[in-house]
Amino acid sequence: MTDFLPLNGTDYIELYVGNAKQAAHYYKTAFGFQALAYAGPETGVRDRTSYVLVQNKMRLVLTSPLNSNHPIAEHHKKHGDGVKVLALWVDDAFQSYKETMSRGAKSYMEPTTLTDEHGEVRMAGIHTYGEVVHLFVERKNYQGAFMPGFIEWKSDYNPKPTGLLYVDHCVGNVGWDQMNPWVKFYEDVMGFKNILSFDDKDISTEYSALMSKVMSNGNGYVKFPINEPAEGKKRSQVEEYLDFYEGEGVQHIAVATNNIIETVTDLKNRGVEFLKIPATYYETVLDRVGKIDENLKPLSDLGILIDKDDEGYLLQIFTKPVEDRPTMFFEIIQRKGAKSFGKGNFKALFEALELEQDARGNL
């Protein structure tokens, strides 16, 4: 079967934040993103400011409103800092919109062409879970820094990159009994396939549980795991997220690296906080995953988790939430052949998350 929605990967991720200027400084300082482009009153945009950051193939857009009655201000008042746009890089934005709309998508942005002296960007968009949207972005006829309406952002402050490469996957948290309806949305509307499923037996501890299904497009360039809560003795991390985000949304952004030890060491030195994994995890992990290329001690010192599948192994670690509400966080992942998502680490990861929840009084 031909893929009716061919995707080249993630074009950018846009966060609505309370103070885009300060958030941009944080992501440059802490994560090593570089200044790329800017939009605001100086570029003719009167109602918002946007700072575009880049590191290798990953683009992050940080946007804040310029008045209190703007829809972005309402979004931020309800959710705090969080992901609004998961933009998808396509060869034909208008056709992508037509295909998804014909299959039941709800329109967010009608087909639009933006032009300036550097060429044109064609865009269109649809709604997904919560207030998150997918924009289809076609930029093959554009040579500027980012897109029309933006100017190149020149900054004297550009900390070195930390080795982050591209978006590996983005995880969404949805409400009770909403995972399967959204799985069906991605299957029917976007042609994705459910490549992995985890139930409450796979992802649980003594206290809490969740269920998850991983959705992938045809070529595997775009993957969206979808989580929902499951019954447990206490409140799960997904329930905590839904309570504090006040709705469904993006739980975490997983970013690939080729050297997780170097990347995480650098991130920690810049002040990024990670979940603490019990030392006992490392006493038996190699019995489970077998031989790995890396020395176990630096992995243990940093709290990096290890898992394997039939095609290899992976190394992964999760930050603490990167805003005051216990909502969105980042995952750093290095794949050594493995195409899975760390099922063998779920118990250790959940126990670490529950310690954080308990400290916040939210377990």
Image (cartoon, grey):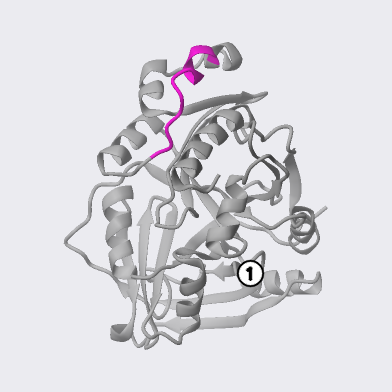
Closer to us: 306 or 192: 306
Indicate left or right for 247 with 301 as reference. right
Compared with residue 35, is residue 117 higher up or lower down, i.e. above or below? below
Tell me what residue is drawn at x 40 percent, y 56 percent: 323
Indicate left or right for 2 with 356 as reference. right
Closer to us: 23 or 28: 23
Q: Quadrant of residue 267?
A: top left
Q: Quadrant of residue 23?
A: bottom left
Tell me what residue is drawn at x 40 percent, y 22 percent: 300
Residue 215: x and y, percent? 70, 49
Indicate left or right for 235 with 270 as reference. right
- Judge whether residue 337 can be spotted in this image: no
Closer to us: 37 or 120: 37
Q: Which residues are magenta?
A: 274-284
Residue 80: x and y, percent? 46, 66
Q: Which residue is mark 1?
A: 92
Tell me what residue is drawn at x 54 percent, y 13 percent: 284
Q: Assign the magenta stretch its main secondary structure.
A: loop
Q: Around disc 1, counting alpha carbons within 10 Å, would you say few (fewer than 14), some (14 to 19), or many (20 or more)? A: some
Q: The C terminus lies in which quarter of the figure?
A: top right
Q: Does residue 57 belong to the magenta stretch?
A: no
Compared with residue 327, is residue 153 higher up or lower down, i.e. above or below? below
Indicate left or right for 262 with 126 as reference. left
Q: Quadrant of residue 124?
A: bottom right
Residue 222: x and y, percent? 61, 51
Residue 272: x and y, percent? 33, 44
Closer to us: 295 or 348: 348
Q: Which kind of residue does numbered mark 1 sit on? A: Asp
Dot 1 lies on which element? loop
- Judge whether residue 18 can be spotted in this image: yes
